[in-house]
Image (cartoon, grey):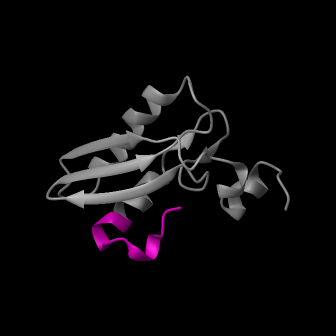
């Protein structure tokens, strides 16, 4: 899981920018869904490590485009590289409390 307190100020800005990327099927942002595993900025390049709720997600290309747009909206970010990982495997416990409430998942 991503530890926000360990991010640089610029990485925190990217983290906040990613909250505008809403999964069109679930209607919850990708941050609250727990899909973002890492954010690193090197020079003007943002590297994002993330997963998807399911392998073969039909929205992966659309999500990549939206994530890239959001990351590049932060000052001094010129490039965004997205690394898709499958470990740890995503599960509903990775969602924020807000996401679980939005989706009607209790517990």
Query: Does the stretch in magenta take in 3?
Result: yes
Res 16 visible: yes
Q: Position of residue 26 (x, y in %)?
A: 67, 39
Q: Position of residue 23 (x, y in %)?
A: 58, 39
For residue 61, side relative to residue 106 (left or right): left
| Residue at image point 47% right, 55% down | 37
Q: Is residue 81 above or below residue 74?
A: above
| Residue at image point 36% right, 47% down | 70
| Residue at image point 40% right, 49% down | 49
For the C terminus, the image quarter is bottom right
The quarter of the picture where residue 66 lies is top left
For residue 23, side relative to residue 79 (left or right): right
| Residue at image point 52% right, 41% down | 86
Q: So how many labels did they put on this image?
A: 0
For residue 51, side relative to residue 43 (left or right): right
Q: Position of residue 73 (x, y in %)?
A: 29, 51
Residue farthest toward the left in the current orientation of the protein: 43
Q: Which residues are magenta?
A: 1-12
The quarter of the picture where residue 89 lies is top right
Residue farthest toward the front in the current orientation of the protein: 87
Observer-nearest residue: 24 or 58?
Answer: 58
Query: Does the stretch in magenta take in 78?
Result: no
For residue 78, side relative to residue 100 (left or right): left
Q: Is residue 43 above or below residue 84?
A: below
Observer-nearest residue: 95 or 78?
Answer: 95
Q: Is residue 65 above or below residue 69?
A: above
Q: Position of residue 2 (x, y in %)?
A: 49, 63
């Amino acid at each position: 899981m991503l530890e926000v307190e360990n991010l640089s100020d610029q990485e925190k800005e990217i983290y906040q920018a990613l909250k505008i990327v809403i999964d069109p099927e679930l209607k919850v942002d990708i941050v609250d869904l727990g899909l973002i595993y890492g954010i690193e900025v090197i020079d003007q390049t943002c590297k994002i490590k993330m997963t998807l709720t399911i392998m073969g997600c039909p929205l992966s290309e659309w999500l990549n485009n939206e994530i890239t747009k959001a990351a590049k909206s932060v000052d001094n970010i010129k490039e965004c590289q997205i690394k898709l990982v499958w470990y740890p495997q995503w599960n509903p416990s990775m969602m924020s409390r807000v996401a679980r409430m939005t989706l009607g998942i209790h517990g």
